[in-house]
């Protein structure tokens, strides 16, 4: 059987989440540069894998999957759990982190600020979105409590989904007001080699 293939550029935050999780599981992944400046998402072959033309896309034997949350869940189920704890509460917080917490950051803050030319930025909207993201991160930190991880002290997909945007949050030139516990949580993430390798990636090519 062929190994795991991930189609997607390393500067995609969704690809980063998948690659981080795969590395935590000790998987060898053939990541192929697709999307962004590499193109390749409009080909018939790629659209056959994902009609939306978005990365990441996984190929693993007979399985072809898109959507990063689905891919990560599949990898843990089929190749894990390894160091990634699983359970209904972990799954619940992983979904919340991706679709509520991080959704409040990626488009309104990262795209609105970094990926938009300075002359076109709506800074009141960006700063309002940043404040909302920090409120939601505060909800996550309240669930984390004494930690170190979000759910019951065990590293899980919830941490991958919550943590994969924090490198950008802490490195953007914006007036941050991180909620209590977030800096310590980020420091714990940085201690993980897989996080440093796959998430702490130079994103300057994305600047608008």
Image (cartoon, rainbow, N blue to C red):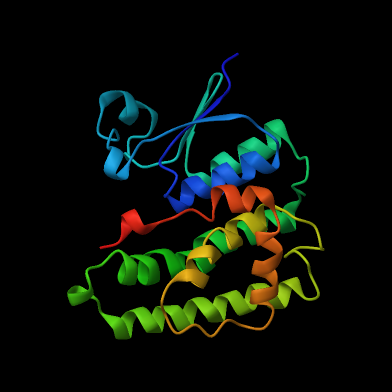
Indicate left or right for 127 with 136 as reference. left
Q: Is residue 118 above or below residue 192?
A: below
- Quarter of the figure with the N terminus: top right
- Quarter of the figure with the C terminus: bottom left
Q: Residue at x 63, y 39 (%)?
A: 22
Front residue of 29/124: it is 29
Q: Residue at x 74, y 71 (%)?
A: 144
Front residue of 55/67: it is 55
Indicate left or right for 2 with 88 as reference. left
Q: Residue at x 31, y 70 (%)?
A: 112
Residue 184: x, y in percent? 70, 74
Q: Quadrant of residue 51?
A: top left
Indicate left or right for 141 with 3 as reference. right
Q: Quadrant of residue 113?
A: bottom left
User: Among all residues in the image, which is located at the extreme left?
Assistant: 119
Residue 99: x, y in percent? 50, 61
Residue 147: x, y in percent? 79, 69
How many circles with numbers are drawn on the protein?
Answer: 0
Q: Residue at x 66, y 59 (%)?
A: 159
Residue 6: x, y in percent? 49, 33
Q: Is residue 91 above or below residue 178?
A: above
């Amino acid at each position: 059987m062929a190994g795991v293939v991930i189609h997607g550029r390393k500067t995609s935050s969704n690809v980063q989440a998948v690659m981080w999780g795969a590395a935590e599981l000790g998987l060898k992944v053939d990541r192929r540069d697709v999307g962004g400046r590499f193109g390749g998402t409009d080909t018939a072959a790629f659209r056959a894998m994902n009609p939306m033309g978005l990365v990441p896309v996984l190929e693993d034997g007979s399985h072809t999957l898109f959507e990063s949350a689905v891919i990560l869940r599949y990898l843990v189920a089929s190749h894990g759990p390894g160091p990634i704890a699983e359970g209904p509460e972990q799954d619940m917080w992983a979904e919340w982190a991706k679709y509520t917490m991080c959704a409040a950051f990626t488009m309104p803050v990262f795209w609105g600020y970094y990926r938009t030319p300075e002359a076109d930025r709506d800074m009141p909207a960006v700063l309002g979105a940043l404040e909302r993201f920090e409120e939601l991160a505060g909800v996550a930190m309240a669930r984390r409590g004494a930690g170190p991880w979000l759910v019951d002290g065990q590293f899980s997909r919830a941490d991958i989904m919550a943590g994969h945007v924090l490198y950008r949050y802490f490195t953007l030139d914006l007036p941050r007001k991180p909620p209590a516990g977030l800096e310590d949580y980020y420091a714990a993430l940085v201690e993980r080699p897989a996080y440093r390798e796959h998430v702490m990636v130079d994103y300057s090519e994305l600047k608008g």
